[in-house]
Structure formats: C-alpha cells, structure tokens
C-alpha cells in the first residue's frame, strides 16, 4: 500500500478498513499491525511532546513518512475509523525508557500495538510507569474524521 500514489494509498486504506471491520478483535489488531509495519520508516516526523500539529488520517497517508509515533497514529486512525471499538478505549501512548528514547504505541482496551512491531501484546506486560504522554480520541480530534 505504501508504495502507491497517495490517491491509491487512501483508497487502499479505506478498503483495508472495510476488510477488517468484521474480524474478531485479535485478528483485526494483528492485521492492522501487519499493515503498518510495512510503512516506510523515518527518524523524525511527529513531535511526541504534543499532538497539536499531528496530521489528520488523509494527510498522514499523503505525506507517507512514518516515525514511530506516525505508525502508531496510523494504527490508531485505522482502528478508530472502523467504528468497531469504544472510542474511549483507544489511545496513542508515548513511552520514555531510561536512556530517554521515546517510543509510541496504540493501546486498544487491554492490548498494545507497535511496541513489538509484529506482535499484539497484553498491556499487563508493559511498565506503565514509563508513560510520558497519552493522547486519546479527544486530544486527536478524531471524531472530526468519522
């Protein structure tokens, strides 16, 4: 999907969301992870301190540059726009480790995506004390994209 022209990326992403809508929860999360792991990775695209200037879903796909936070944001938008989950159960969470490195993941109910790139993990295995920032659907103005 990520090697297509931006119009085709948007169309392909819409089709992807339609195909996962009726899957069981774990298959939906796994397929979303599998899609976004193929996004072209750059060192820095989004400011992890603030989501004020983060792109809407379509701008994210048009720009086609994905740092760790942008991949997490893509996963968040994918799940949010399926209209399957309670919107309060989706968050983009920024973690800082001891060396100051930041990483972003999506928390969906009791599962985390983008922490181990091809795995969906249970949030009980994550050290919540390392949380640096948390952005929910309200913070991301995601309801405007429905």
Image: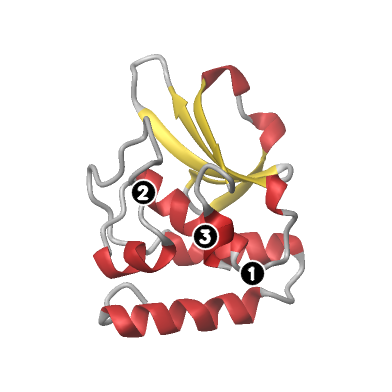
Q: In this figure, which residue is indicated by the disc labeled 3?
A: 77
- The first of marks 1 and 3 along the sequence is 3
Q: Point out residue 38 in the picture as x, y percentages from the top left corner.
A: 37, 64
Do callouts 1 and 3 mark residues in contact (Cβ within 8 Å)? no
Callout 1 environment at 10 Å: few (<14), some (14 to 19), or many (20+)?
some
Q: Does residue 91 appear left or right of residue 10 in this picture? A: right
Do callouts 1 and 2 mark residues in contact (Cβ within 8 Å)? no
User: Which of pointers 3 and 2 indicates the residue nearer the eye?
Assistant: 2
Cα distance in 3D space between marks 3 and 2: 12 Å
Identity of the residue furthest to the front in this view? 144
Cα distance in 3D space between marks 1 and 3: 9 Å
Labelled disc at residue 125? none
Q: Tell me what residue is drawn at x 64 percent, y 69 percent.
A: 82
Q: In this view, does 50 lie above or below 28?
A: above
User: Which of pointers 1 and 2 indicates the residue nearer the eye?
Assistant: 2
The one nearer the camera, 123 or 21, is: 21
- The first of marks 1 and 2 along the sequence is 2
Q: Point out residue 24 in the picture as x, y percentages from the top left corner.
A: 77, 68
Label 1: state its secondary structure: loop
Callout 3 environment at 10 Å: few (<14), some (14 to 19), or many (20+)?
many
Q: In this figure, which residue is indicated by the disc labeled 1?
A: 82
Q: Is residue 64 above or below residue 12?
A: above
Q: Point out residue 130 in the picture as x, y percentages from the top left corner.
A: 52, 20
Label 2: state its secondary structure: loop
Callout 2 environment at 10 Å: few (<14), some (14 to 19), or many (20+)?
some
Q: Point out residue 94 in the picture as x, y percentages from the top left corner.
A: 47, 32
Q: In this figure, which residue is indicated by the disc labeled 2?
A: 54
Q: Tell me what residue is drawn at x 28 percent, y 70 percent.
A: 62
Cα distance in 3D space between marks 1 and 2: 20 Å
Q: Which colour scheme is used?
A: secondary structure
Q: In which quarter of the image is residue 81?
A: bottom right
Q: Tell me what residue is drawn at x 37 percent, y 77 percent.
A: 1
């Amino acid at each position: 999907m990520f090697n297509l022209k931006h119009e085709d990326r948007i169309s392909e992403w819409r089709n992807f969301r339609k195909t996962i809508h009726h899957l069981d929860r774990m298959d939906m999360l796994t397929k979303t992870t599998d899609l976004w792991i193929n996004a072209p990775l750059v060192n820095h695209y989004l400011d992890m301190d603030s989501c004020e200037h983060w792109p809407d879903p379509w701008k994210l796909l048009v720009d086609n540059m994905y740092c760790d936070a942008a991949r997490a944001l893509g996963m968040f938008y994918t799940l949010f726009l399926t209209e399957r989950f309670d919107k309060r159960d989706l968050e983009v969470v920024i973690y800082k480790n001891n060396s100051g490195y930041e990483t972003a993941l999506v928390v969906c109910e009791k599962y985390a995506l983008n922490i181990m790139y091809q795995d969906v993990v249970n949030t009980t295995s994550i050290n919540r004390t390392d949380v640096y920032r948390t952005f929910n659907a309200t913070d991301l103005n995601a309801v405007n994209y429905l």
